[in-house]
Amino acid sequence: MHHCLILLLFTLLASLAPLTMAAGRCERVVISADPAYPPLHWHDGKNFHGASIDIATRIMKDLGIPYEVRYLGPWKRVLSAAQSGSIDLIATLKNTPERSSFLLFSDLVLSNPVAAFVRKGNIVPYNKWDDLIPYYGGIARGNRFGRPFDDFMDMHLAINETDNLEIAFKMLQANRFDYVITGYHSGMAYLASGKLDDKLMPLTPYLIETANLLGFVASSPCAVHLPAVNKQLQKLQKEGYIERALMQAREEWRLAPNLGKN
């Protein structure tokens, strides 16, 4: 009887092994992103657009890796999906200590400095971070900008989160915020599409110069492709494709600034 049980257990484990191996393969890379962060990535209610999406899918095509671009809803839901392992790749975001606990980051994709945007008629005197302390600011929910600025913001600045950047800029115009913090590219895209160039402006110097990177979910079997993705990314950088993708995305957003209900 004892030998029969051992044989039965061995047979059961052997039969499950192929299923375990199949579950560990990368069948396709499921990609998602913040749906309201043009020109890097945005969702118009039907499809994703933006430079980050174009770059990520171009790399997958070049490497012959099957992929799917999936809309999940607001940015915080995208991050939760990555933490739970229900997607494989985020295109693109900033590397923070919290995110690095569940993501493996690529080499540089896009340089995306962070700026504080203010009303032109009420410019906040600014030369260093401390100058923002007396004022009230806003950010889009889930946004992080990189250390050490995130640490400073959490400890010293009066910041309120809004559902998205569009709402934050409306609150800035309505004098409910003194400034709004966001990536420079995204902020300028919103100014252009909303014809707000004569009303709002970014402060200089930038708050921080940080990069936007592709983020593979560490628990995903598709993370095995990261070295190949980095190699292809370097090739596209040398060819000038990355900069062209950003310019094209800016123009696409300018001509059709459309966000779905995110």
Image (cartoon, rainbow, N blue to C red):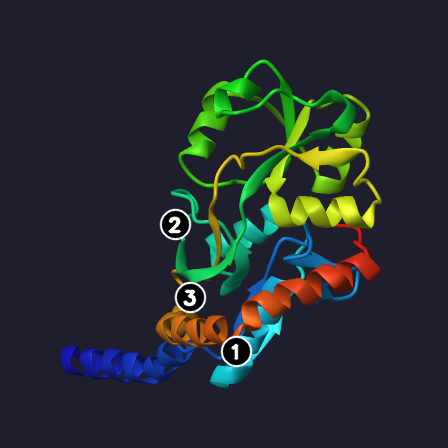
Residue 60's disc number:
1
Pointer 3: what residue? 220
Residue 215 seen anywhere in this rendered image of the structure: no
Residue 257 position (above or below residue 133): below
Residue 228's disc number:
none
Query: Which amino acid type is marked by label 3?
Result: Ser
For image coordinates 60% across by 73% down, the residue present is 68
Measure the alpha-carbon separation of dots 2 and 3. 14 Å
The 10 Å Cα crowd at callout 3, few under 14, some 14 to 19, many 20 or more, is: many
Residue 2 position (above or below residue 45): below
49 or 207: which is nearer to us? 207
Residue farthest to the top? 134
Task: Estimate the x, y position of residue 10 in percent, counting from the top left.
Answer: 23, 81
Mark 2 or mark 1: which comes first in sequence? 1
Residue 182 position (above or below residue 104): above
- Horizontal relation, residue 244 to residue 5: left or right: right
Query: Which amino acid type is marked by label 1?
Result: Met
Mark 2 or mark 3: which comes first in sequence? 2
Task: Estimate the x, y position of residue 52 in percent, counting from the top left.
Answer: 59, 63
Task: Estimate the x, y position of residue 145 in percent, counting from the top left.
Answer: 50, 40
For image coordinates 75% across by 28% down, the residue present is 119
Assign the N terminus to one quadrant of the image: bottom left
For image coordinates 53% across by 60% down, the residue present is 90
Residue farthest to the left? 3
243 or 194: which is nearer to us? 243
Instruction: Indicate the secondary structure of the residue bearing disc 1.
Output: helix
The 10 Å Cα crowd at callout 1, few under 14, some 14 to 19, many 20 or more, is: some
Task: Estimate the x, y position of residue 103 in percent, counting from the top left.
Answer: 41, 55
Q: Quadrant of residue 40?
A: bottom right
Pointer 2: what residue? 100
Instruction: Indicate the secondary structure of the residue bearing disc 2.
Output: helix
